[in-house]
Structure formats: structure tokens, C-alpha cells
Image (cartoon, rainbow, N blue to C red):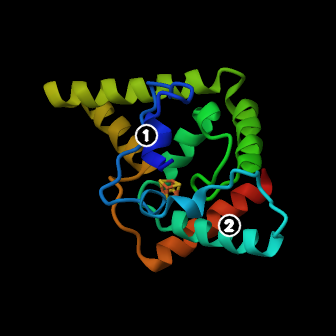
Amino acid sequence: MSRTGVANSPHYADPDPRFPFPHSPTPTRCQTDPKLFDFANGDRTSDRAATEKRLAKARRACSGCPIVKDCLRWALVNKPLTKVGIFAATTPGQRTALRKRMVDRLGPDWIDVLADQDQARRERAAAARHNPLTISQARIVRLDREINGPMPKPLTPTQQQRNMARLMAGLKAA
Ligand code: SF4
């Protein structure tokens, strides 16, 4: 099943409607080469060397993906949809560890906390469209951009490497 299929399939648990699968400006590698990302047997198979090679290849592909950050968020939030496979360079086991860290940071209702933050961000953006920003609102918008970054665009090779290093460091710490 393709990645698009995972997100849309009626046979899987419903995705959380508050977190739609992120839109990519270009087709992602997991859409054009879904087999590379499917690890239906868990993190390891009997042919460990071949699995490691495939894992490394999938991680490299994710590190250059324009929606890697939102993909990881989507995968963490939608646990029933991401029991298997590589999403945002993470294995199911690594995502479980990251979910535990989210509980530590934001509490057991961390998904609701994220949804509330998103809603507040959307409301601020909508208000900014209809009313001129006050100085303090403009400050909040600027801060939001600094924290969440600009609209995704294709990454340079250097950015891809940096992304990869950050992902791996984060996962090691998990
Ligand atoms: S980060 Fe990886 S799994 Fe997620 S959309 Fe991009 S290529 Fe697919």
C-alpha cells in the first residue's frame, strides 16, 4: 500500500483529523518508492545487513524530504497508522521512544496540547488576515516563524546532511 494509501485507507484506524498528512510541493520518495520504507517485519529481519542498508537508504531519502518535520509529527500522532514502516527516518521502535519523550515534555495529553497550539496558530493567522497586526501580535507571528520556520522548500545537500545529523542526535538521546 502506498503512503498516500496509508493515510487515506478506510481499512486502517482513522487518522486524527486535527493533523492532516502534510502537503509536499513535490512527490516524496515514500510515494514514488514505497517499498523502501516498508518494514512490515519490525525494525530488523533475518538478513540484518540488507535491512540495515535499506534503513540507511530510507533515512537518507527522508533527510532530504521537504516535509520531514511535519511527517514525523503526523507519524507520532497517528500511532495506529504507523505501527510499521519508516516515517521521517524513524523506525516504529524509535517513534515509541519519541512518544514517551513527548509525554515527559507535554504530559499524557500531549496530542491535545499540540492540536491546541496548532489551532491557536491558525486563529492568529486568520486574525492577521482580517485585521492589521498590533505590535505585540506582529511579534508573536515573528516568533512563530522563528520557531516553526518558513514554508518548506527543497533542501540543499548541506541542509540535508545537517537535518540527518540532528535527527540521529535526537534519536540517540531518546
Ligand atoms: S519524511 Fe520520509 S516518510 Fe515522511 S513524507 Fe518524506 S520521504 Fe516520506
Task: Tell which of 121 and 61 is nearer to you.
Answer: 61
172 vs 137, nearest the viewer: 172
The location of residue 129, given as percent across then percent down, is: 17, 30
**Callout 2 secondary element:** helix
Q: Where is residue 65 in the image (x, y as percent from the top left)?
A: 45, 62
**Residue 108: quarter of image:** top right
Label 2 or label 1, whichever lies nearer to me, is: 2
- The image shows residue 44, relative to residue 121, as above or below, that is below
Spatial CA span between label 2 and label 1: 22 Å
Disc ID at residue 21: 1
| Residue at point 52%, 68% (across, down) | 61
On screen, residue 106 above or below 59: above
* Picture quadrant of residue 79: top right
Q: Which amino acid does label 2 sit on?
A: Leu
Crowding at label 1, few (<14), some or many (≥20) Cα neighbours within 10 Å? many
Q: Which mark is residue 55?
A: 2
Of helix, strand and loop, which one carries label 1? loop
Classify 92 as above or below 29. Answer: above
Q: What residue type is labelled 1?
A: Phe
Position of 114 with respect to 79 (left or right) is left
* Residue at x-position 40% and y-position 44%: 22
Whether residue 25 is visible to the viewer of this picture, yes or no, is: yes
Please provide percent x and percent y for residue 87.
58, 52
Say which residue appears at 80% left-offset and 75% top-offset: 49
